[in-house]
Each structure stands twice: as structure tokens, then as C-alpha cells.
Amino acid sequence: MERVYFTEYKGKKLLYIDMSKCSAEEMFEIIANAREIIRNQPEASVFSLTDVTDAWFDPEVIDAMKEFVAGDKPYVVAAPVVGVTGRVMKLFDRRLVLFDTIEQAKEWRADR
């Protein structure tokens, strides 16, 4: 199953990053795949939607996520996230938009 791919919702392009229910090992693979895709896009062009519902966050995954989020900052215009708590969000030095469901995040993107 592909976990990182471009899709459209109501005519708006977004990069879907599905980290839901992933182990630490799977998280590292998805981060590497997403990093490669994002950094091959023009700067300030990517709207991503990341689902981390029930994903495994240990210190190594958190460090990898911090590096990923910081390095992709020039490319990502907006980054709605589903399935994360405010406490986890404080670990990242970037303002991300949080939603309870994928549908809410897609609707938010459709309005942009």
C-alpha cells in the first residue's frame, strides 16, 4: 500500500502522507519517501495532509520528524495534520494545522 502520494480533493492538489498505525520502522521509511517527494517540488508549492493516528512516536521517530518538518519548510505552504495531540505538536518548531478527521483537513484545503 502506497503511503505517500499526490491526490486531489475538490480540484485542489495535496500530498497525502499516511503514517497511521505505523511502527517506528515504517515511520522512518515514510519520512524518507515523503522527504524525497517534497524536496523535488518547487519551493512554496506543497500542501500536505499527514495522518498520524495511532502511529508510534519514540525519541528516534520524534527526532526524525523534527528534521523532516524543518527541512521541508521551504516547500510546504500548509500542513494539516490528523491524529496528533497538542502535547506532541510542541515538539515541532513549526505551526501545523490540527484536525480531528481527514475529511475536515481536506475541506480546509479545499477552501485554500
Image (tube, rainbow, N blue to C red):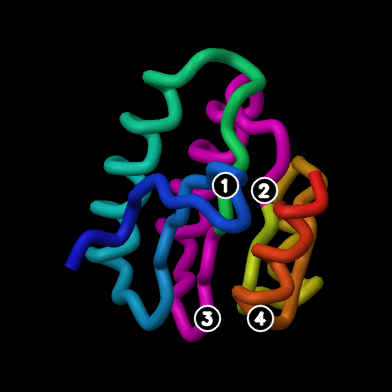
Discs 2/3, front: 2
Which quarter of the rendering shows the C terminus? top right
9 or 42: nearer the viewer:
9
Which residue is the site of mark 4? 101
Name the amino acid type tagged 3.
Thr
The amino acid pointed to by label 4 is: Thr
Q: Which residues are magenta?
A: 50-79
Q: Residue at x 41, y 57 (%)?
A: 60
Give whichever of discs 1 and 2 has the lower sequence position.
1
Instruction: Please name which of the two marks, 1 or 3, marks the residue nearer to the observer.
Output: 1
The residue under label 1 is 48
Residue 82 % position (x, y): 63, 72
Closer to the eye: label 4 or 3: 4
Image-based side of 88 in relation to 72, left or right: right
Residue visible at 52% across and 14% down in the picture: 42
Q: Earlier in the sequence, mark 4 or mark 3?
A: 3
Q: Considering the numbered disc 4 on the image, is that residue within a helix, a strand or a loop?
A: loop
Mark 3 — residue? 53
Disc number for residue 79: 2
**Which part of the image, by quadrant, shows the N terminus?**
bottom left
Q: Is residue 61 magenta?
A: yes
Cβ atoms at labels 4 and 3 below 8 Å apart: no
Would you say the residues marked 1 and 2 are in contact, meaning their CB atoms lie under 8 Å apart? yes
Q: Label 4 crowding class (10 Å Cα cut-off): few <14, some 14-19, many 20+? A: few
